[in-house]
Image (cartoon, rainbow, N blue to C red):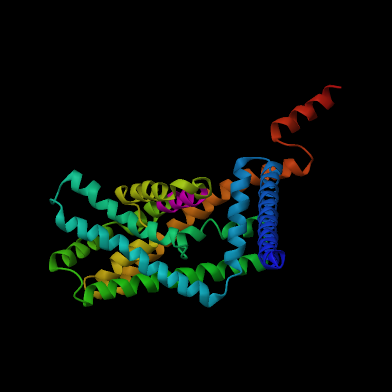
Amino acid sequence: MGSDNNAPSNQASDEQQQASAEAQARDEQEKALEDQNEGSEALDTKNLPSQAAAVHERLRIDGEKELERDTFALMWSAIAAGISMSASMMAKGVLHTHLPPDSGVSFLIENLGYTLGFIIVILARQQLFTENTVTAVLPAMSHPNLRNLICLLRLWGVVLLGNIVGAGLAAFTFLHLPMFTPEVSKSFVTIGEHVMENSAFEMFAKGIVAGWLIATLVWVMPSVEQAKVWIILIVTYFVAIGEFTHIIVGSSEVLYLVFDGKATWGDFLFHFGLPTLAGNIMGGTFIFALISHAQIRNDMDVQRQGKRGAWLYKQRVNGKRSK
């Protein structure tokens, strides 16, 4: 009788052991798959001719994904980014209001607020036009054809329009809803008027530097996984204190003036918008992305000849000639 009573408990114990063994086997299988995936990634990186080529490849793949995204998904993400970028104007205006006027230290502190919008947009993975002057351009440079060019222009057009719409919505809301004190609202006007003090050519020239710096930020991001916030803060802070013009942040600032009746739509479009946009594209695409791609293209061309690097290739060619 005693042995019959123990039979169910022994059976339950055996089932628990079997379940535990199956769970352990599944864990080991999952770990093996993870190790295999990590090994393949390391192998891919090892097969590339340089670390710069590895960064280029990651950004190119990201760019291809962006080019394939649905138009409406891009638009909503871009509008969200435009609204988020208005946080730069908001934070800078609030700090400007509460700091002593006409002080060099105040200038340095208030421009920390400029970085807020970039931190939000980049960490939230929202669509920002000046990021796409690098990421989305690399696939078109790697495979220059009509289809990729059309996809790039579609992405640029949708994201730029969405960013400006979002920035305009935020500026209109800041002006017409009782969100801020009159002093802060006055600071918004001061910030916008300071931007408009630049001539159209200065907008263009300063836009080149801003585009180049944001492109540099995008390029180094894959290498600084644990320090993204610091890199964003440092690079965009220098955009702020250098007073370099950025098409999306500046749109919030200038559109606030337009909605307040202190600037016209012609001022926004011809004095600020088009020159700054041209400068950002020049700095981000035609200077940074093009030169960076040319460097990687040379490395890849050498690798296709079966060599690991240009120096080794030249050494072997010279060796064969000497024989």
Q: From the viewer's perspective, is 237 left or right of 40?
A: left
Q: From the viewer's perspective, is 206 left or right of 192?
A: right
**Residue 271 visible in the current orientation:** no
**Residue 116 visible in the current orientation:** yes
Query: What is the chief secondary structure element of the magenta stretch?
Result: helix
Q: Quadrant of residue 269?
A: bottom left
Q: Is residue 85 magenta?
A: no
Question: Residue most toward the right?
Answer: 323
Q: Position of residue 149 (x, y in %)?
A: 62, 65
Q: Nearer the viewer, residue 80 or 136?
A: 80
Question: Residue most toward the front?
Answer: 1
Q: Position of residue 160 (x, y in %)?
A: 45, 68
Q: Nearer the viewer, residue 249 or 94?
A: 94
Q: Residue at x 40, y 50 (%)?
A: 229
Q: Residue at x 22, y 60 (%)?
A: 93
Q: Quadrant of residue 136?
A: bottom right
Chain part drawn in magenta: 210-219
Q: Position of residue 279 (x, y in %)?
A: 43, 56
Q: Nearer the viewer, residue 302 or 51?
A: 51
The answer to whether residue 252 is above or below residue 71 is above
The answer to whether residue 298 is above or below residue 120 is above
